[in-house]
Amino acid sequence: MRRNVGHPGVVGTHDEDPSGLASDLRAAVAGDVDFSVTARALATMDASNYRRVPAGTVAPRDADDIAAVVEVCRAHGTTPVVARGAGTSIGGQATGTGVVLDLTRHMGGIVSLDPSSRTAVVRPGLVLDRLREAARPYGLTFGPDPSTHSRCTLGGMIGNNACGAHSVAWGTTADNVRSLDVVTYRGERLTLGRGGEGAPAGLLDLVERNLALLRTGYPAGLPRRISGYALDALLPERGVDVARSFCGSEGTLGVVTEATVALVPLPAEPVLVVLGYADESAAADAAAGLLPYGPLTVEGMAADLVRGGAEGLPKGGAWLFCEVDGDGAARELVRSADAVDAAVVREAAGQRALWRIREDAAGTATRMPGGGDAWPGWEDCAVPPARLGAYLREFRSLLAEFGLRGIPYGHFGDGCVHVRIDFDWWSGEGVRDFRRFSEAVADLVVAHGGSLSGEHGDGQARAELLPRMYGEELVGLFGAVKDVWDPDGGLNPGMLVRPRRLDEGLRFEGLLPVEGVGRSAARCVGVAKCRVEGPSSGPGVMCPSYRATGEEKHSTRGRARLLHEMALGEVITDGWRSEEVREALDLCLSCKGCRSDCPVGVDMAAYKAEFLDRHYAGPGGLWRRPRSHWTMGRLPGWLAHFGRGLNAAMRLPFAARLAGVTPERTMPRVAERSFAYWFAQRASTRPSSLTLWPDTFTNFLAPEVGEAAVRVLEDAGLGVDLPPGRVCCGLTYVSTGQLGAARKVMRRTLDVRGEAEGPVVVLEPSCAATLRTDLPELLPDDPRAARLAGAVRTFAEALEELAPDWTPPRLDRPVTGQTHCHQHAVLGDTADRRLRERAGLRGDLAGGCCGLAGDFGFEPGHYEVSVTIAEDQLLPALRTSGGATILADGFSCRTQIGDLTDLRGRHLAEVLAEGLEEGLDSGPGSSAS
């Protein structure tokens, strides 16, 4: 229950006492007040280059809470308040030194949706995709659609006046807002609308005194003018629209508590036309000429942004992505466009695949071709569309003049360009060049009649440069307007008005310039693709623990932020011994999903392994480790030395507790005979074509998988051999952060392999991924490690590469199950899909993570999260399987399926071997007898 914060004695005057502020806030609000080290560390950064350390965070439940927060903060020496949604702002405007409001936790609902009026009333923490999903059954959507639509919030979109790909048709967020309920720093509650509705006292008088300046001070013909305050929306001829003028104010005027927004009809027959051009300049020059044909999107990107092939794209060195409504419009656009080539994509799946290339650009562009990082910093300027080609040519020249590299892309139909640039943040000269370049490119944008921001707002990154665009008089008026709305200056100070310097408070300050966990974690630019709410859809894996918990600290970004702060040592002060970091990493499944799904390739599994290794280093560290690190973390050694004897040991009273295993789990049984023993007892006269890797799980726990693989490989005409001694990839040691032991095991394995050549087929995806990635990364100076990594093949890859003419048994049955998360992230499953198709195995496998993830699901305290993760994709797929064959190549996946259902998952090799035994091996090219 809230207390009356205005009552004497309730609010203290602890201006320098964060704990006093926290206690007063707890007394005043019903929401969550968190001033912990973890909460502060998670909110120091957004998706920009900047960092500000807050006093604490509050997750308000409603407008009353927000009003209570600002009242307490006013009483505490005008403590700043910053509203925050998903924290994906690129200008630094979602960071603050006082209290950060997390509007996503409790204020994310849809109040109402009226299809007849095509409006919705939403709360500020609502994720855009949730609104779009709710509107879709009525044939409606919210027009603005930033590439972060799966996690950005409506409040953040209003604060930044976000746009997105469809702005050529549906405009910016401001174009789609009808009214706003806001709370000012002085606790005043206003409803903003047209006709001056909700204007704070003095605002309209200020406008009346400056009509000439407002009519002449803004550039014309610019659809993407996001910079500064939109004061021209307050002109009489524009309806004195207070709500529209508030959009894009970046939380500096008030905090949105509710918004009424307009919805637009979905296209009846969306068709994606991708037009290929010789180069980026040609595409940019062509974009404005397409607008008369009414496209819904005109998005541009060049070949240097396409990584891993351009499958589905037409010929060319650059492309325009144009969505239209209907085949007729598509044909007209293709006929009218002077393009090198064109592709017309009608199927939804094909459209999604191509759009994903464009949507991931904000992250993909942070990794330069050939290596190196690129960063935000000059992110999203806009010029009149007809001038885009000329601007880009001069912009490229300016990059070259400063010795910088960047990859422009963006909303070419609106003249808006995004670019990440390889600024050098690690030296004083590099930071000085960042400032000099920013000033030079600002002048270039203004010379072309453009806006310093065309989508993401000014924040700290561009506000200092606004006088170059608007002049001192209009920027001075911005300050006067800020003072009318917020005379105390408590809302997001340092942004937009009286800004901090653009090279001040950079988040890289204090990090070592050499590679390390801190610098690696700094690679996370905060685009928050890991924060997508569950359940997931599609093949992606990242980030299973966030989808299970909804907690930022259990997202890839959250963990990267904590590691970053650990390296800086200001908020997290105990370095590698940090319990805050350990706790956040505790629910990391080491699924490696972020290695592929994160647009910038953050590899949290690797960071976790290094952290655990260092966390438990030093005197007494070995004994501080969880028991599971000694048991499951060293499972290969236990199985090699004790084998079936472990079955009896695990039946002893309290065995699970002593082994560090949660009582909800049943431990797998060790097989009566190992796969290596079975292989040694059989005779084969075939010359060896490959080495089959007897991984720990196949060898001791599931030898039937190895036996089936031998049957299939030999049917394909391949001779199979095993390594001449015991080998281990080191997976369990790596995942529990025992890196010294992992390197020892890996070197012993390399000694056993010796100088052997030829492909190495690994049946367990997690072991194959470890050999392909962790092995060379942990032993970078041993050439044998890179050689073995390059020799690794999955079962399907080996059949496709070594026996291309073999015809698998024709099984003709439906399948379901799950692609192993490590296979998705590291190995790829293209060969598996083709093999299943050739065998007549119909259906797609679920994505995501099974939730068991080696030792993770067996450890105490993880069971509920493990089951929740399985409920994301795996278990729903199994419930609707309808008797389909359950495929799961990973031992953990099969174990999870057996533990949580009465179904049995099988390796693809087992299913194919059964088909051979049943005589289903008909078809040309089969070598079976």
Image: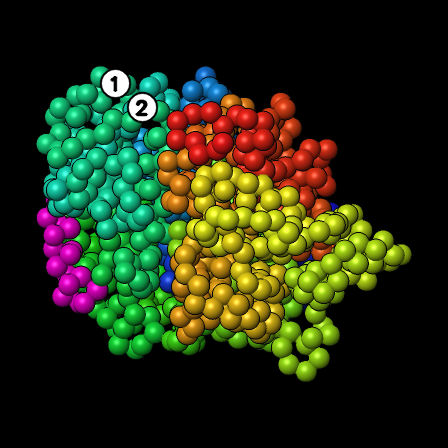
Q: x, y percentage for residue 866? A: 67, 47
Q: x, y percentage for residue 215? A: 20, 42
Question: Badge 2 is on which residue?
Answer: 346
For this view, does 26 lie left or right of residue 483?
Answer: right
Q: How many marks?
A: 2
Q: Secondary structure at mark 1?
A: helix
Is the residue 314 above or below the residue 406 in the image? above
Is residue 89 in view?
no
The type of residue carrying mark 2 is: Arg
Closer to the camera, 404 or 769? 769
Q: Nearer the viewer, mark 2 or mark 1?
A: 2
Which residue is pictured at 49% across the width and 59% down the height? 771
Question: What segment carries the magenta color?
Answer: 387-404
Is residue 470 in view?
yes
Question: Badge 1 is on which residue?
Answer: 327
Q: Are marks 2 and 1 in contact (CB under 8 Å)?
A: yes
Farthest residue, direction bottom: 619
Q: Secondary structure at mark 2?
A: loop
Q: x, y percentage for residue 49? A: 37, 62
Closer to the camera, 258 or 431? 431
Which residue is pictured at 39% across the width and 31% down the height? 925
